[in-house]
Image (cartoon, grey):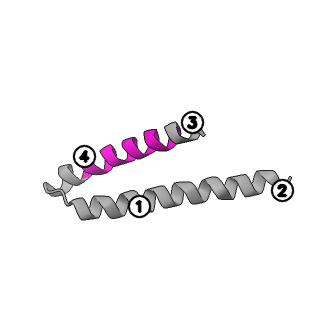
Amino acid sequence: MDLRRNLYVAAFVGASLSYIFNVLAFTGTFDVFRWFVFAVIFLGFTYGFEKFIGWQTDSV
C-alpha cells in the first residue's frame, strides 16, 4: 500500500500543479473551489480506473 499511496500522491501533485499553472496562464485568476472540484474528480477517476484495471486483470 505504501507504493500505491506514493503513486497517488505523485499523480495528484503533478496534476494539481499542471492545473494551477494552466489556469493562471490562461485566466490570470485562481479559484480554490474549482481546484477542489478538479482534485475530487481526478482522484475519483484515478481510483476508478485502478479498480477497473484490477478487475480486468484478475478475471484472466
Q: Which residues are magenta?
A: 7-22
Q: Amino acid at mark 2?
A: Ser
Q: Residue at x 36, y 60 (%)?
A: 38
Q: Amino acid at mark 1?
A: Val
Residue assigned mark 4: 21
From the image, which quarter does the N terminus lie in? top right
Q: Amino acid at mark 4?
A: Phe
- Farthest residue, direction right: 60
- Marks 2 and 3 sit apart, C-alpha to C-alpha, by 25 Å
Q: Main secondary structure of the magenta part?
A: helix
Q: Residue at x 37, y 42 (%)?
A: 13
Q: Is residue 19 above or below residue 14?
A: below
Mark 3 or 1, which is nearer the eye?
3
Between disc 1 and disc 4, whose residue precedes? 4
Between disc 2 and disc 3, whose residue precedes? 3
- 42 vs 24, left or right, is right
**Is mark 2 in CB contact (under 8 Å) with mark 3?**
no
- Marks 2 and 1 sit apart, C-alpha to C-alpha, by 29 Å
Q: Quadrant of residue 59?
A: bottom right
- Farthest residue, direction front: 1
Q: Secondary structure at mark 4?
A: helix
Residue assigned mark 2: 59
How far from the left and from the top, in percent, is residue 45? 52, 60
- Are there few (<14), some (14-19), or many (20+) residues within 10 Å of tag 2? few
Badge number at residue 2: 3
